[in-house]
Amino acid sequence: MFRLRSVFPRALAVAVLSLSAVTACKQGQTGKAAGTAPSASGSAAKTATGVCAQYSEKICATAGAESSTCAAFKTSADLMAPEACKAGLDKIAFSVKRLGTLKESCTQLTKTLCDKMGADSQSCTLVKEQTGKFPPDKCKEMLDHIPEIVSELEQMEASNRPLSAEQMAPLLAGPVPAFGPENARVKIVEFSDFQCPFCSRAASAVSQLKQKYEKDVRFVFRQFPLQMHPDARPAAIASLEAEAQGKFWAFHDKLFENQSQLDRASLEKHAQAVGLDMVKFKKALDESTHGAAVDRDLKLGEQVKVNGTPTIFLNGKRVQNATDFAAMSAEIDAELQKAPTPG
């Protein structure tokens, strides 16, 4: 994932615009991002006490709490005599000034990117938040890759722009698992993966939305099994057979309730539990009856820049926290208040 020219430009773009990174399974995800600054929250960083802890806190407030400078200083402070820390505190203005000079590259990076992206853009706001956490050497290297960073930011910002009515139309078109009236004022489309743990949390939120808004919201479920989840595609095909038999939502809930059990035998067990015709169900899995429908959903998702699950569009807007019922409910209420009554 982090393969752009240098790891740092890509890391910044991901940091400032991948708002759902902590609540989504990402396509091609391989674990902790390369190039991440050492955390200042390690065990050594927690042991300094008294005046030395105060000294390190002052330094970290200037250097950035997540910077390598902060982490190194906290480790050093644990080894310093209290008298040395007190002397440092007495001369803290010198250290702050020196750190400010070192971080000039980060100040320049922020200004350059905000000038390129626009002072009022989401990118600028988030760049300001993130660059304060970077060590000066990272900011300095990023300054040599401004065109690459801007390109990444523009692409990622474009993927977060609301979809037009023309883009939403094929996402809403059936036949597809859905609930709620087709002419509802609020229309929601979810791209999901039955093996993604974050999708399980989203399913819980969707269940609450179904109870609260079934008459006011049109909700459409689209398949987006990620390649890194080997059981996700068979589960998607199985769920579409459940849809064909009129029991999609019961099967949907059963899969997410038993997410660690999605192998063939388990899928058959879940199908039997919700009362599916097992002859038809097994045939659908054997012949991949609904494989083409899954592929169509994947293509639809790719066309609107879905690269992780769950991805939810609410009246065309990408929901930033698709696992939070309260947040989604607030967005729905806002839409219901401003949307005109359908004719």
Image (cartoon, rainbow, N blue to C red):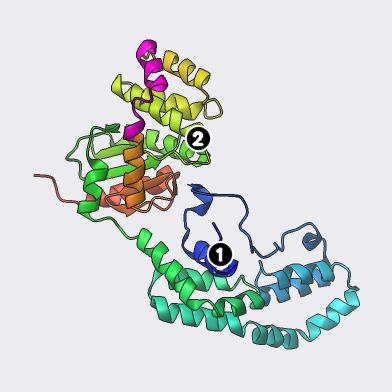
Say whether disc 1 or disc 2 marks the residue closer to the N-terminus: 1
Along the line of sight, the residue nearer the viewer: 96 or 5: 5
Q: Residue at x 81, y 60 (%)?
A: 44
Which image quarter: residue 338? bottom left
Which image quarter: residue 279? top left
Callout 1–callout 2 Cβ contact below 8 Å: no
The label on residue 295 is none
Residue 93 visible in the shown view: yes
Q: Residue at x 30, y 57 (%)?
A: 162
Residue 132: percent from left, percent from top: 59, 73
Along the line of sight, the residue nearer the viewer: 177 or 314: 177
Q: Is residue 332 above or below residue 148?
A: above
Relative to 58, 199 lies left or right: left
For label 2, the residue is: 195
Q: Amino acid at mark 1?
A: Ala
Q: Amino acid at mark 2?
A: Gln
The label on residue 11 is 1
Q: Residue at x 35, y 14 (%)?
A: 280
Label 2 environment density (alpha carbons within 10 Å; few <14, some 14–19, many ≥20): many
